[in-house]
Amino acid sequence: MKLYHKYFLYQNKLLQPYIRSFLAATAVITYVASIAFLCALIYQYGFELTPETADKLNTLYKAVWIVFLADMSLHWLLEYADTRKKYRKLAWVLSILLYLTLVPVIFHRPEDNGSILMFWEILHSKLYHVVVLSVLSLLQLSNGLVRLLGKRTNPSLILAVSFFIIILVGTGLLMLPRCTISGISWVDSLFISTSAVCVTGLTSVDLTTTFTTEGFVVILLLIQIGGLGVMTLTSFFALFFMGNTSLYNQLVVRDMVNSKSLGSLLSTLLYTLGFTLVIETMGMITIWLSIHGTMDMNLEEELAFAVFHSISAFCNAGFSTLPGNLGNPLMMNNHNLFYVLISILVILGGIGFPILVNLKEIIFYRLKRMTQFLLRKNKVSAKSVQLYNLNTRIVVTMTFLLLAAGTLILLAFEWNHAFVGMSIAEKCTHAFFNAACPRTAGFSSVDFSLFGIQSILIYILLMWIGGGAQSTAGGIKVNAFAVVILNLAAVIRGSQRVEVHGRELAHDSIRRSNATVVMSLIILFVSIFLLSWLEPTLPLLSLTFEAVSALSTVGSSLNLTPLLQESSKLVIVVLMFVGRVGLITMMLGIVKQKKNTKYKYPSDNIIIN
């Protein structure tokens, strides 16, 4: 028996390299099948199909189905122990759902009516097959993308490339015949796709007269993917369903999603998706309640309107299905609650997911303490607990100050100009709304060309600052702006350290904040220079407004975007892409990183002032 055991171990060790190579080859085939399946779905969605084409697509679906069955079966047969270890429970569920598609193949249709027949028909339906294969295809591609991180590929480069790929896919989808009413040029399609994925909101065409319902669905999906982030979604799929990524992969993903530890990596991803789902659902319900029966829409149209604007607001995209954005006459009367709800969604989306998590922890802690006090009917022992972390304090404080200052300034300068003819409540509401939207939302309730020069300058400043880090917002971020201001105050006071709320800011945070501000100003100067050269007849202020809006992924415009030439639109596309991926991230992905050295050069001072 011992001799046989040794022979078995030797044989297993001998065959293992060949088994792994074989499974790696099947994995490549599965990736190709996943891409082919998703492309076939897109083709079926976007074009009118002839019977011959429909038959070919059905043949392709069957081939992909066979590939997935073969790949999964081979893993169970050849690497059962490893597969059992690395698969999560949900991956097991997906495996069972896939194998259940064999039931209609093995067993004939039951003759008796009842639950067995219903179960057989569900498993035999095309919808069931398409849903299972779609989830498995997305899972395979997500797992493959995360595994790329294990190849020591530059994470910043992967992030930028993933956004670029989604933009190209969105460009192709928006050019499908079913997505447009009378077609669209590739430049405009690229522009709208980039604006949606980068959650900007700038539009080079009139959305309502260009896109069909299917086109708006594509735009909405691009907004959701762009708002959450490609790596957030793919990492969630790979870790939540499979859980078989390497330690290095998890470390890189942890840095990308700003998780505190590997143990909290999956919970961070779950919090991100959970907060998004809950807030957008609550936003959809409250928006629907605020507009119900007031806009000459049926129930289906009202729900679609509420869903679209809830997602667009929380993701800070600024797209609207109404002509003239939210300045449409249907919205301008007796809809103050709607504008307040949109503003709240914009603020929540732009404040940052780490802040939302910290605020959730604070609320839960307060509720727990209150419950303990009520149940015990005596005083709960006072404990010194640090509830607010430094990042939360800075972001919440700066957000409040920017909103308050922006609201008051717009009220002061536009009381008898852009807001003329409105009631006092409407003026306050629209001032607050237009102070919140520069936090990279891009919605508009009044024509920006009616704003005075002072209001436009304030708007440009607010757009340039943007929202919070690790959020759906753009700009240099309020975190970086606050750090730069605190560093400036420390220099003026002659302090050697930057201190705030009993903490000393890390030197790396100061360096990155200063670098972000400088790079932002350089990119803006270059882009404005190019736009002024390409569009010599257009006002410089309008071009500056457009460039800042694009780089900060805001989406506001002085009615300039449709007037731009194709070359100028491509400049704006690049600005939107750089603004969404991030200035530091772009540089880290492009510039070769210098290794840390163990020596130091002698320090010296440069004469400043």
Image (cartoon, rainbow, N blue to C red):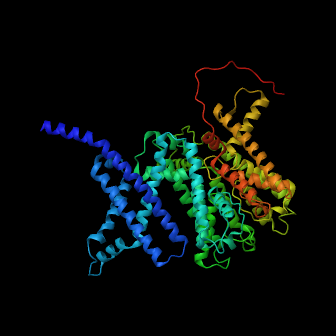
Across and down, in percent, residue 572 comes to: 72, 55
Across and down, in percent, residue 485 comes to: 74, 38
Across and down, in percent, residue 514 comes to: 71, 37
Q: Nearer the viewer, residue 466 or 31?
A: 31
Q: What residue appears at the point 79 percent right and 50 percent down from the top-left corner?
A: 530
Q: Is residue 359 visible?
A: no
Looking at the image, residue 9 lies above or below residue 45: above
Q: Nearer the viewer, residue 153 or 353?
A: 153
Question: Residue reaching furthest left?
Answer: 1
The quadrant in which the C terminus is found is: top right
Q: Is residue 192 visible?
A: yes
Question: Residue reaching furthest front?
Answer: 52
Residue 110 located left or right of residue 243: left
The quadrant in which the N terminus is found is: top left
Q: What residue appears at the point 69 percent right and 73 percent down from the top-left corner?
A: 209
Across and down, in percent, residue 176 comes to: 59, 69
Q: Nearer the viewer, residue 192 or 464?
A: 192
Residue 20 located left or right of residue 176: left
Residue 588 located left or right of residue 427: left
